[in-house]
Amino acid sequence: MLGEEATKTEASTLPKNMIPLLVVVIVLAALAYLAVSLWAGFDEVVKAVQAVGAFGLLGVLATSLLSYALGFVRWQGYLTMVGYTVSNIPSLSIFLGSFALAMTPARSGELVRGVFLRKYGVSFPASFAAFAAERVIDLLAMALLTVIGLWAFTPARPIVLLVVLVIVAVVIVLNLPKFLGTIRAWAALKLPQKLSGFATGLVDTALNFRQLFGLKGSSYGLAFGLLIVALEGLGLYILLASLGSDIGLFTALAIYGFSLLAGALSFLPGGVGGFEAAMILLLTANGLAEAQAVAVTLLIRLCTLWFAVLLGIFVLPRVAQN
């Protein structure tokens, strides 16, 4: 279980420690995007980007901003559930500032929120619990959005039902404290030390902050999670429509949800690599030209992940100085 002692590092110095990692990841991602563009035909990729146009990009950025806004509303709700109230302006600054550290495995760098929230009386275990609930529920939302998009394909419906059953099973397990205690005991005895500590910490978090992981908390988080991911998936659909693609909305949502899952499960910083590979593969499989698939993938990443990182880089130094 993470405790108060886990945050002894001064808030003003923590972001500086992450800057080298952020720079390296950004440079590597830029090189990877350039390599993919060259592979697909750089001129054709540029033409596809130009074909999207300013209105298409503004539409995608608008959906991204709406998804960030919903994410903040959910975050404030989570803080309320664990017994804390933080004014909207400072809490929003901390929430947006944490995006600067999104380029970490499982977006773990965003735990910096807990460091800054201590100034407002929020205990680190509570903010960690809210963050853990956010990540777990987001994974479920990605999976659910993917299967909703797949429902239109009759052969895929058994898979859809299976995933829905798995999601329901996860929610049920999170509401069975005795069963969670059994899982904790097994993890403590059977897993390697580092993995055991992580697993038992997560179980302790779920047990100590059950209001976040219970039926009410899970339903609340999942409803917001679906809207957040669907808005970003709508951004993908807008890009595809700008290029005249006949890929439908539900298919676009399924492609986006699955690509997010691929990125998240790769445990690479920001999911870079896993997301892009999955999306390019799925877009081309649905009839989009290779260069267009690359262009759409790069644009959706720029307008969602990298736009968030840019906002975070702008806001975080100001948060650290307060």
Image: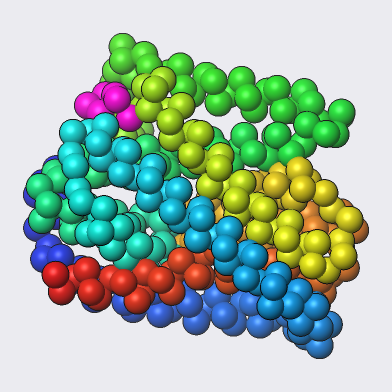
Q: In the picture shown, does residue 2 fall above or below 283?
A: above
Q: x, y (%) of residue 106?
A: 43, 52
Q: Is residue 57 left or right of residue 19?
A: right
The colour style of the image is rainbow
Of residues 11 and 228, the one drawn nearer to the viewer in this rendering: 228
The N terminus: image quadrant:
top left
Residue 229 can be seen in this image: yes
Q: Quadrant of residue 14?
A: bottom left
Q: Quadrant of residue 94?
A: bottom left
Q: x, y (%) of residue 287?
A: 90, 58
Question: Is residue 146 a member of the stretch shown in magenta?
Answer: no
**Number of marks present in the image shown:** 0
Residue 196 can be seen in this image: no
Of residues 231 and 4, the one drawn nearer to the viewer in this rendering: 231
Query: Residue at the spot x=34%, y=45% of the render?
Result: 75
Q: x, y (%) of residue 276?
A: 66, 63
Q: Is residue 93 left or right of residue 72?
A: left
The C terminus: image quadrant:
bottom left
Magenta segment: 207-212
Query: Residue at the spot x=68%, y=23% of the render?
Result: 162
In the displayed image of the protein, which residue is found farthest to the bottom? 43
Query: Residue at the spot x=61%, y=20% of the render?
Result: 165
Q: x, y (%) of residue 317?
A: 25, 75
Q: Is residue 188 left or right of residue 305?
A: left
Query: Residue at the spot x=12%, y=63% of the render?
Result: 9
Q: Is residue 151 left or right of residue 103?
A: right
- The majority secondary structure of the magenta stretch comes to helix
Question: Is residue 208 a member of the stretch shown in magenta?
Answer: yes
Of residues 59 and 221, the one drawn nearer to the viewer in this rendering: 59
